[in-house]
Amino acid sequence: MDKNNNQRWTILGQDPEVLLAALANILSWFVVTFCPRFLPYLLPTSPEEDQGDDATSIDETRTRCISIGRPGGMEQLRLVTLKEDICTIGYNVKHVSPAPYTPADGFVLPEDCVVVKNLAFSVNYADCTIRWGLYESAKKFVGYPIVPGFDVAGTVERVPANNSNFSVGDRVFGCTLFGAYSNRVVIPTIQLRKIPDCIDSFSKAASFPAVSLTALYALHLAGYFPGGVDEGGSRHKFKNKSILIHSAAGGVGSFLVQMSKILRLGPIVGVVGRSSKVDEAYRLGCDVVIDKSSEDLWSAAFKACPGGFNTIMDANGVSTLKESYNALAPSGRLIVFGFHSNLPLGQAMLNPLEWIRMARKQAIMPKFDAM
């Protein structure tokens, strides 16, 4: 065991919390696979849940949500009905209650919040890592139980007396810092916007807040947003405004392409993993699209921008991170917005072999020294 400069202990180079999550997942896998009759003992409940006979009935006045009681597989996703007058809540609304639920004895809605009757939420890959116990801010700010989810879209159900931003019945969409897998959420008004008329469904409205804000923040880290030099976009002064975007037709990547176009970056080089995504990447605004399933990614990248890229947005992790770093121009920036090649895809639960694979990939992650 050793201690790093941030005073965080590691065991064999791994964060102890990651090892605990691995053990919890392996225990769930073992029970589900070999002795499923013991599964109820691995599904903890909370005092806010209604355990009565009417808990399974559909009552529009009661909050129903997806709760995760401990790290594990899909079996940890439980549809629960909360007791009367309890809603889910994000972790940044501590002046009302700690996440994930409002107090059982009722609460006073503060002036900066509303209650949203949530009619749609999105499912992001981050939600899977929350369930596995690998999402750091979920562990740090909420713990277990936790109601996952960030994106919401619905109608305003309750407003405080002095609120002038929204009225009951307004169609709204936005983000909550966890708690979106619910039909009733307390959300600060600063995190909500009215749904414009051009968006014709709640599901569409709930599909893009988290990914678009992730893209916007990535461009901020790259030095391009806010837009002008005087507004903080310090890197607009460079002549080289080239940008390479991995997963350019994905959720975050598609917004990175469109926002880069608005910010007049270019050439915008998008990378996709299948030929079926090439046309979509061009439609979004890419100047060059590299289909890495049919051509060498880095040969095509240097052909598109021989001097290197001023910005590279990487969502892959171990599979491309080293090469992305090497493809930067002098003073270029590598922005990491995901590690999906480090993590399994399409797995309902993680067996011991998957954890060994993840540990191996983590061990070979490149380390950079800009000097």
Image (cartoon, grey):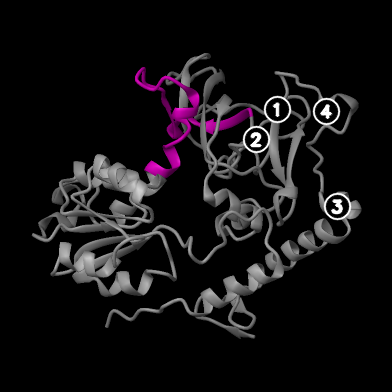
From the top left corner, tell me how far across and down residue 223 is, in percent.
24, 56
Q: Residue 323 or 79: which is nearer the viewer?
A: 323
Q: Amino acid at mark 3?
A: Leu
Judging by the rendered image, the residue that carries numbered circle 4 is 55
Q: Quadrant of residue 303?
A: bottom left
In the picture, measured across the screen, residue 191 lies left or right of residue 223, that is: right
Question: Residue at position x 61%, y 44% from top?
Answer: 148
Number of the label disc, if any, that sits on residue 160 = none
**Residue for point 51% across, 67% down:** 342
C-alpha separation, residue under disc 4 versus residue under disc 1 = 10 Å
Residue drawn at (75%, 19%), measured in percent from left and top?
59
Where is mark 3, residue-wise?
39
Instruction: Tell me which label, 3 or 4, sits earlier in the chain.
Output: 3
What is the C-alpha distance between the residues marked 2 and 1?
Answer: 8 Å
Q: Is residue 193 magenta?
A: yes
Of labels 2 and 3, earlier in sequence is 3
Instruction: Classify 254 as above or below 301.
Output: above
The local secondary structure at tag 4 comes to helix
Magenta part of the chain: 183-212
**Classed neighbour count for the residue bearing mark 4: other residues with Cα under 10 Å, few (<14), some (14–19), many (≥20):** some
